[in-house]
């Protein structure tokens, strides 16, 4: 069988006999049964990335908590839960997703700068493994909540190490001007306060400097700072921390990036931590699922203007907002393999939403495509469906999980009836017939 993988970063998306497959399933077959657009994920790829991460830290005290914000699909989370993964969550909703997928509270880290009292209550009731606290007011709020429940909250304080992650400004989190974490100059006093407040057990320190990081040096700088801080807390404040939460953020290749191999990342962490007796926690998201997903879309129209050719597809910015929000680059390939001798032309790949920003690619060199043909937008497994919306009253697109030669719809496309049913009329706007029906 003629076979051509798309590249080393997406080995589970391959042309076979001229048709793009996810593992052993033709994407055109899924499109015929499910309709377009849809997200498609590779189980094999997700499992391989998790196992590779875990193997890199074999022999060490390590807790891997998948960042649910990257992809919260229950089937994806269940796939990871069966491998022993924990979860890093940022809301009660994400916490409930992790629980529903079989990840117990004892394997969940609750992060985020704005946890409400009710979310704290829920987390403690689920025996959360750790709550990462990001400010002094949050510390006091958590103390009050835990004390009222008669519970002790296991906490780590997230420090802001003031390290430039050298990533996109909107996903950098480790500079002192960012909203995340407690300033280095305040952290010792914050731990002293945590040790004095009732209902709190300070166990660790947490750091996370950003997402889509492709260099090890900023990470190493941040990790060395928090390790030195751990030693200082033990010596100066008498607080014997046992956990070090090093966050996530390791990048993937979308275009020309050269992210370090996970093995090099692990070697750096081991070098920094040395013989310190600490349980390490990591919160990978994009690394696990980013290159294991694609958004499949259909060309609706080919429109030629005076200066450009537009491929108008049925996916839109509400389905994948990264290009619009972050100016992100995603590879786009035809589902039917182009003839290698076929010339490429520059095109604008755009969606139907009434925004100029509804653009997936500009001046992209693609083989000539016609209305009705399918295209795959690659590296869409992270922050794709998770950030989607119903803008323009567009239905959320289905998600499909592939395993070898099988596939299943793991989030169905909703109906327009269910979309409209989310709203309701106040009494003064209800028509008489609706009042009579109690709607």
Image (tube, rainbow, N blue to C red):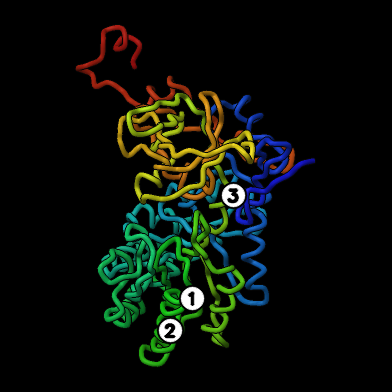
The crowding category of the residue bearing disc 1, from other C-alpha atoms within 10 Å (few below 14, some 14 to 19, many at least 20), is many
Q: Which residue is mark 2?
A: 230
Residue 160 in the image: above or below residue 392? below
Q: Quadrant of residue 114?
A: bottom left
Q: In the rendering, at what x and y percent does residue 123 appear?
A: 44, 57
On the picture, is 96 further left or further right than 75? Answer: left
Considering the image in quadrants, where does the N terminus appear? top right
Along the line of sight, the residue nearer the viewer: 141 or 111? 111
Between the residue at mark 2 and the residue at mark 3, the CA separation in whole angstroms equals: 36 Å
On the picture, is 4 further left or further right than 85? Answer: right
The secondary structure type at the circle numbered 3 is helix
Q: In the rendering, at what x and y percent does residue 269 appear?
A: 54, 78
The secondary structure type at the circle numbered 1 is strand
Q: Can residue 131 be seen in this snapshot?
A: yes
Q: In the rendering, at what x and y percent does residue 341 appear?
A: 62, 39
Q: In the rendering, at what x and y percent does residue 84 appear?
A: 64, 59
Q: Quadrant of residue 18?
A: top right
Callout in the foreground (1, 3): 3
Residue 178 in the image: above or below residue 425? below
The secondary structure type at the circle numbered 2 is helix
Q: Residue furthest bottom?
A: 235
Q: Residue furthest top?
A: 433
Between the residue at mark 1 and the residue at mark 2, the CA separation in whole angstroms equals: 8 Å
Q: Residue at x 56, y 31 (%)?
A: 374
Q: Residue at x 32, y 65 (%)?
A: 180
Residue 81 in the image: above or below residue 439? below
Q: Residue furthest right?
A: 1
Q: Which residue is mark 1?
A: 244
Q: Residue furthest left?
A: 428
Tags 1 and 2 touching, CB below 8 Å = yes
Q: Which residue is mark 3?
A: 292
């Amino acid at each position: 069988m003629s076979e051509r993988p798309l590249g080393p970063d997406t080995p589970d998306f391959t042309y076979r006999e001229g048709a793009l497959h996810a593992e052993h399933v033709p994407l055109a077959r899924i499109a015929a049964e499910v309709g377009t657009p849809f997200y498609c994920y590779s189980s094999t790829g997700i499992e391989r990335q998790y196992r590779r991460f875990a193997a890199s830290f074999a022999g060490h005290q390590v807790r891997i908590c998948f960042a649910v914000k990257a992809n919260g699909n229950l089937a994806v989370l269940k796939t990871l839960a069966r491998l022993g993964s924990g979860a890093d969550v940022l809301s009660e909703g994400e916490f409930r997703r992790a629980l529903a997928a079989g990840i117990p509270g004892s394997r969940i880290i609750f992060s985020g700068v704005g946890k409400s009292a009710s979310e704290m209550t829920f987390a403690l009731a689920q025996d959360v493994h750790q709550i990462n606290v990001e400010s002094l007011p949050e510390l006091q709020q958590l103390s009050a909540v835990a004390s009222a429940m008669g519970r002790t909250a296991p906490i780590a304080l997230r420090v802001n190490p003031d390290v430039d992650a050298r990533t996109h400004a909107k996903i950098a989190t480790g500079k002192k001007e960012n909203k995340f974490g407690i300033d280095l100059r305040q952290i010792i006093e914050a731990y002293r306060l945590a040790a004095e407040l009732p209902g709190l057990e300070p166990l660790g320190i947490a750091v996370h400097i950003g997402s889509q990081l492709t260099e090890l040096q900023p990470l190493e700088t941040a990790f060395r700072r928090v390790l030195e801080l751990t030693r200082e807390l033990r010596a100066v404040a008498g607080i014997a921390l046992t956990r070090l939460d090093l966050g996530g953020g390791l990048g993937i290749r979308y275009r020309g990036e050269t992210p370090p191999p996970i093995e090099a990342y692990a070697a750096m962490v081991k070098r920094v931590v040395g013989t310190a007796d600490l349980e390490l926690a990591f919160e990978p998201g994009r690394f696990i699922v980013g290159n294991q997903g694609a958004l499949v879309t259909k060309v609706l129209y080919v429109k030629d203007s005076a200066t450009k050719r537009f491929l108008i597809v049925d996916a839109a910015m509400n389905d994948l907002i990264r290009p619009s929000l972050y100016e992100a680059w995603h590879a786009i390939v035809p589902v039917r393999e182009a003839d290698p001798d076929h010339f490429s032309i520059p095109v604008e790949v755009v969606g139907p939403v009434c925004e100029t920003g509804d653009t997936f690619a500009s001046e992209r060199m693609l083989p000539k495509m016609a209305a009705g043909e399918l295209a795959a937008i690659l590296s869409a497994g992270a922050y794709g469906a998770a950030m989607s919306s119903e803008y323009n009253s567009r239905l959320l697109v289905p998600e499909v999980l592939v395993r070898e030669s099988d596939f299943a719809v793991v989030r169905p496309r909703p109906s327009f009836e269910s979309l409209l049913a989310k709203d309701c009329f106040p009494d003064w706007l209800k028509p008489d017939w609706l009042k009579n029906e109690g709607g």
